[in-house]
C-alpha cells in the first residue's frame, strides 16, 4: 500500500482538536472554587461564633496565606499542563512560600503572644486529636472539587513533568480546601492550626502525587 494512501486512511476519522486556552481554563477553575465556597457557606458551614473568629489574627493569617498559595499553585499547575512549560521551578517557589507562611504565623501569633488557646494547660488539650482528625478529614473533602477540575484539565493538556505538576495540583487543591475550611474551623490556636492544617494539606498532596500521574497518563 502506498504511503500516501496509508496516511490518508489513518487521517480520515481525525477531528480538529481545540487548542488550550489558559485563561479559559483559569476561569473554569475559579468558577468551580467559587461555587464550592458559596455552597459551603449557604449550607451553614460557617462556625457559629464567626464574629469572634474574624477578630482573631489567625483567621486573617490563614485566609491570606492559603488564598495566595492556592492562587499561585493553581496558576503554576495550569501553566505546567503545556509541554514547553517547566513545573519544577515554580514548585520550589511554592514550597518556599509554604515555609514562609508557617514562619509568619509563628512570629505573628506565637512570638508576639497573641495566639488564642495558649492558656491551655497541656499539649494534648491544645491539639485535641479527635477534633483535629475531623478537621483534617473535612479539608481533604473540600479539596476534591478543585482537584477533580485540575485533574481533568491536566488530562486534556500535555504536561511533561507530571510528578512536579501533580505536586502543584495537590498544593493548589489542598490550599483551597483549607481556605474554605477556615470559615468553619472551630479553633484559633496557632499550634492546632499548624499541626492539623499541615496534616490535612499533606494528605491531599501525597494522594494527588500518587494517583494523578497514573490517571492522566496518555
Image: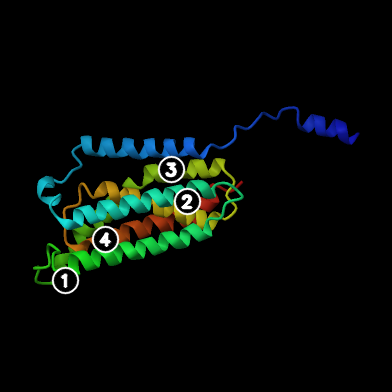
Report which residue position mark 1 lands on. Answer: 123
Q: Residue at x 66, y 29 (%)?
A: 16
Q: CA distance from mark 2 to mark 1?
A: 37 Å
**In which quadrant of the rendered view does residue 132 lie?**
bottom left
Report which residue position mark 4 lands on. Answer: 196
Q: Residue at x 42, y 36 (%)?
A: 27
Q: CA distance from mark 2 to mark 4?
A: 25 Å
Quadrant placement of the N terminus = top right
Report which residue position mark 2 lands on. Answer: 76
Q: Secondary structure at mark 4?
A: helix
Q: Is residue 140 visible?
A: no
Query: For mark 1, does the 10 Å Cα neighbourhood hold few (<14), some (14 to 19), or many (20 or more) residues?
Result: few
Left or right of 170: which side holds 191? left
Q: CA distance from mark 4 to mark 1?
A: 14 Å
Q: CA distance from mark 4 to mark 3?
A: 23 Å
Q: Position of residue 201 (x, y in %)?
A: 34, 57
**In which quadrant of the rendered view does residue 145 lie?**
top left
Left or right of 2: which side holds 116? left
Which numbered disc flags the more N-terminal residue, 1 or 3?
1
Q: Position of residue 153 (x, y in %)?
A: 50, 41
Position of residue 210 relative to residue 30, above or below, is below
Left or right of 15: which side holds 129? left
Which numbered disc flags the more N-terminal residue, 2 or 1?
2
Q: CA distance from mark 3 to mark 2?
A: 16 Å
Q: Position of residue 190 (x, y in %)?
A: 20, 63
Amino acid at each position: 500500500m502506498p504511503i500516501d494512501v496509508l496516511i490518508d486512511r489513518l487521517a480520515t476519522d481525525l477531528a480538529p482538536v481545540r487548542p488550550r486556552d489558559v485563561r479559559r481554563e483559569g476561569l473554569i477553575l475559579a468558577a468551580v472554587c467559587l461555587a464550592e465556597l458559596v455552597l459551603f457557606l449557604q449550607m451553614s458551614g460557617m462556625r457559629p461564633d464567626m464574629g469572634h473568629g474574624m477578630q482573631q489574627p489567625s483567621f486573617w493569617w490563614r485566609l491570606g496565606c492559603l488564598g495566595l498559595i492556592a492562587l499561585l499553585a493553581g496558576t503554576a499547575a495550569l501553566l505546567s499542563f503545556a509541554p514547553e512549560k517547566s513545573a519544577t521551578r515554580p514548585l520550589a517557589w511554592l514550597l518556599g512560600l509554604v515555609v514562609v507562611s508557617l514562619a509568619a504565623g509563628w512570629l505573628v501569633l506565637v512570638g508576639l503572644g497573641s495566639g488564642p488557646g495558649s492558656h491551655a494547660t497541656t499539649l494534648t488539650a491544645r491539639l485535641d486529636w479527635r477534633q483535629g482528625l475531623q478537621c483534617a478529614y473535612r479539608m481533604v473533602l473540600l479539596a476534591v472539587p478543585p482537584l477533580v477540575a485540575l485533574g481533568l484539565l491536566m488530562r486534556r493538556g500535555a504536561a511533561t513533568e507530571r510528578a512536579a505538576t501533580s505536586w502543584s495540583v495537590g498544593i493548589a487543591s489542598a490550599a483551597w480546601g483549607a481556605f474554605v475550611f477556615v470559615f468553619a474551623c472551630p479553633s484559633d490556636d496557632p499550634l492546632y492550626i499548624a499541626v492539623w492544617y499541615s496534616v490535612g494539606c499533606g494528605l491531599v498532596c501525597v494522594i494527588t502525587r500518587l494517583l494523578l500521574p497514573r490517571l492522566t497518563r496518555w
